[in-house]
Amino acid sequence: MHRTEAPAAGGRRRSRALAPGGLPVLGHALLLKRDPLGFLRSLPALGDVVDIRLGPQRAHVVCHPELVRRMLLSPRVFDKGGPLFDKVRPLVGDGLFTSGWQEHRRQRLLVQPAFHPSRMPRYAEVMSEEIERFAGSLREGRPVDLGDALTALTARVTIRAVFATRITAAHVTEVQRCLPVLLDGIYRRMTAPLGVAEKLPTPGNRRFAQARRRLSQVIEQTVGNAARDASGTGGDGAGLLSLLLDAHRGGTGEPGPEPGPAGQGYRPTLGELHDQAMTLLIAGTETTAGVLSWAFHELSVQPGAAGRLRAELDEVLGGAAGRPPGLPDLPRLSYTRRFLTEVLRRYPPAWLLTRTTTEAAELGGAALPAGAVMLFSPYQLGRNPALFAEPDRFDPDRWLPERAGEVPRGAMIPFGSGNRKCPGDELGMTEATLTLAAVASRWRLEPAPGTVIRPLPKAALVTGPLPMIPYRR
Ligand code: HEM
């Protein structure tokens, strides 16, 4: 598809600016905390790279899609790392998401094949089972917090996709309960300025510590059992972790030599398997649940789009008394897919992402020292009127093939780009499409009276409480 390059902000040369409104000492930290989305949206008008101050730290917000793209395609210079990551790493370990450039390469080579499209039918089976269980739990007229219910659903799907048949049903339920507590706690710790309140023996901190300990134990036990399995294939060989398990079992449990072209020869330790499992559980749960929560919210407030979506579901699946969707239906659910893509533009779960420079660098004419903190925001890009006409309008048809080519290169990156691009993009989109189709073909979910939904920028961009009432169609 031909992509245009967006002009520099306001038709000017690429520019660098310092955001106004910084306070002594705190800089822009309060603005970013009070109204992060509004603050981010105000920056592209100022320049292509906008400097802000977060306390003593200067950070550079890259606003122009072409510069974001350039940054993401230079991972040796713009690597993962920096102060935010230093806080996350001890909590989630050294998995694919947090690892630095060199380590990342061999991890990714080992994990990536587990996301190959040929494996999708096995994952889709798990999804369909869990989606039917979820749809079957809805009761006519009985309010449900859809945000929580969808987090439970995506957690169960991710857990079962990661561990395949290796994990017991009781452990699935236990991990599903621990994950939201962990996700919430990680975000609080990431954004805590001093790191003191998190150490106090409050009930919230105890719950976090307990959830983290228990999750770690279950993962350790599950990974340990699978690793000791003499049959040699990590259970049925179908889980996201199975290739890592195979690589581990092929060796001594100690890190091996540098990998060959396909990562052969590298032997992940049990500790690495644990961190990778934790990473996948964290990365796959709240993101997909966030997209789905927003999708059901939009469905309840966008009557035009909702009508078209239901018409497509009726045609493909046979109406309210029809059959559940499966993988072979996806090519015919094109409006459903466009609907979800538009949700991702408006509410990308990964709303703010970071990089750090490993050496002195230049970006769009801006000189950056080594160790500079770089920020970029898929949310900011998706709401920039210079990149998307009427960005606040919900218009799934922007993603019709003949119109999608108008979107400037690098402007739509809900899954990131370059070597750190989300490996679970198709998995997440498949899960979201099947869930939306299965539920919306049978149920109409209406907001509970008095509910006001605003984007809540946490670790993911979520809806907050989402009380909805199901009615049969
Ligand atoms: C709709 C759902 C999802 C969204 C919007 C999403 C978004 C993202 C984004 C933006 C990144 C790149 C972060 C960066 O560049 O700093 C990422 C990375 C990642 N995602 Fe996803 N994700 C989703 C679902 C999933 C699923 C289902 C899984 C796995 C089960 C997953 C696993 C990962 C992993 C392991 C990484 C780190 C990749 C690396 O650094 O090599 N994600 N995701």
Image: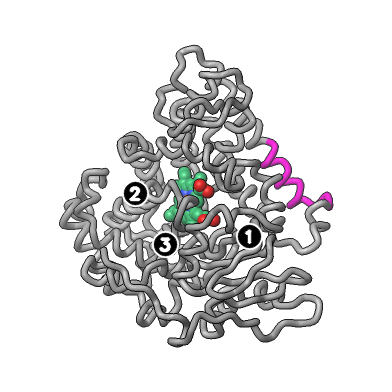
What secondary structure is found at the residue carrying circle 3? strand
Q: Disc 1 marks which residue? A: 357
Asked if residue 86 is positioned above or below residue 95 in the image, the reply reads below
The span from disc 2 to disc 1 (Cα, nearest Å) is 34 Å
Question: Which residue shows up at 58% across the image and 80% down it?
Answer: 16
Q: Please state which amino acid type lies under the numbered disc 2.
A: Thr
Q: Quadrant of residue 116?
A: top left
Horizontal and vertical percent position of residue 243: 46, 29
Q: Nearer the viewer, mark 2 or mark 1?
A: 1
Please say whether residue 206 is one of the residues in the magenta stretch.
yes
Please say whether residue 187 is one of the residues in the magenta stretch.
no
* Any part of residue 379 in sight: yes
Question: Does the beta carbon of the residue at mark 1 sit less than 8 Å from ligand 1?
Answer: no
Horizontal and vertical percent position of residue 170: 54, 30
Q: Disc 3 marks which residue? A: 469
For the magenta stretch, what is the residue range? 200-213
The prevailing secondary structure element of the residues shown in magenta is: helix
Q: Is residue 33 left or right of residue 324?
A: right
Label 3 vs 1, first from the N-terminus = 1
Question: Which residue shows up at 71% across the image and 40% down it?
Answer: 210
The span from disc 2 to disc 3 (Cα, nearest Å) is 25 Å
Q: Is residue 267 left or right of residue 142?
A: right
Q: Please state which amino acid type lies under the numbered disc 3.
A: Ile
What secondary structure is found at the residue carrying circle 2? helix
* Any part of residue 154 in sight: no
Label 2 vs 3, first from the N-terminus = 2
Q: Nearer the viewer, mark 3 or mark 1?
A: 1
